[in-house]
């Protein structure tokens, strides 16, 4: 049986549409569309005690490392300081900041640590020292 060229022309757009529909998708294409948009935003959001700086805090400290001055502060989630902590280092002029968000893992033992602001080795060391000072048993 021989197919008419008109039938082939009619089927061709349908097969092209199917190819486009099944084409690979990328994160940047779906991250701002439903249903992904809300989940993506929630993943990037910090708890309100962090984002609004509304935690329980200790006095800040001014420290010097390798001739550079820094301001170091700590804060924790109210009524849950043992499991939710934030350590922040500011540059001497206050224009840059870096952080370490430490939240206790579900096993109740280890902390999940998330560095914020892409700290260099000096700042990472300061953040880790602040964490160790606040958690002498860990």
Image (cartoon, helix red, strand yellow):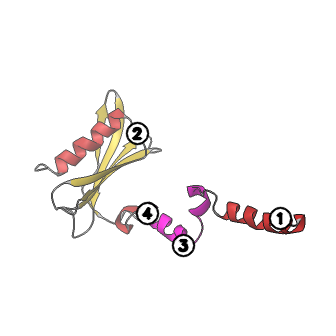
Q: Do the residues labelled 3 and 1 touch (CB within 8 Å)?
A: no
Residue named by callout 3: 35
**Is residue 33 on the magenta stretch?**
yes
Closer to the eye: label 2 or 4: 4
Determine the residue positioned at 22% across, 67% down.
80
Does residue 68 lie above or below 7 as drawn? above
94 lies left or right of 7: left
Residue named by callout 1: 8
Residue 49 coordinates in the image, percent (x, y): 35, 66
Q: What element carries label 2?
A: loop
Does residue 27 lie above or below 4 as drawn? above
Residue named by callout 4: 43
Q: What element carries label 4?
A: helix
Q: Do the residues labelled 2 and 4 touch (CB within 8 Å)?
A: no
Determine the residue positioned at 47% across, 68% down.
39
- Looking at marks 4 and 1 on the same chain, the residue that comes earlier in the sequence is marked by 1
Distance, label 3 to label 4, CA atoms, is 14 Å
Distance, label 2 to label 4, CA atoms, is 31 Å
Q: Is mark 1 on a helix, strand or loop?
A: helix
């Amino acid at each position: 049986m021989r197919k008419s060229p008109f039938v082939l022309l009619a089927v061709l757009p349908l097969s092209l549409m199917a190819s486009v529909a099944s084409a690979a998708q990328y994160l940047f294409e779906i991250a701002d569309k439903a249903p992904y948009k809300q989940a993506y935003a929630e993943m990037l959001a910090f708890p309100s005690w962090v984002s609004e700086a509304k935690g329980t805090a200790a006095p800040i400290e001014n420290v010097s490392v390798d001739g550079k001055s820094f301001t170091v502060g700590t804060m924790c989630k109210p009524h849950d300081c043992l499991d939710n902590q934030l350590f922040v280092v500011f540059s001497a002029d206050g224009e840059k900041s870096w952080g370490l968000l430490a939240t206790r893992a579900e096993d109740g033992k280890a902390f999940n640590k998330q560095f914020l602001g892409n700290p260099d080795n000096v700042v990472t060391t300061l953040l880790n020292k602040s964490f160790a000072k606040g958690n002498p048993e860990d």
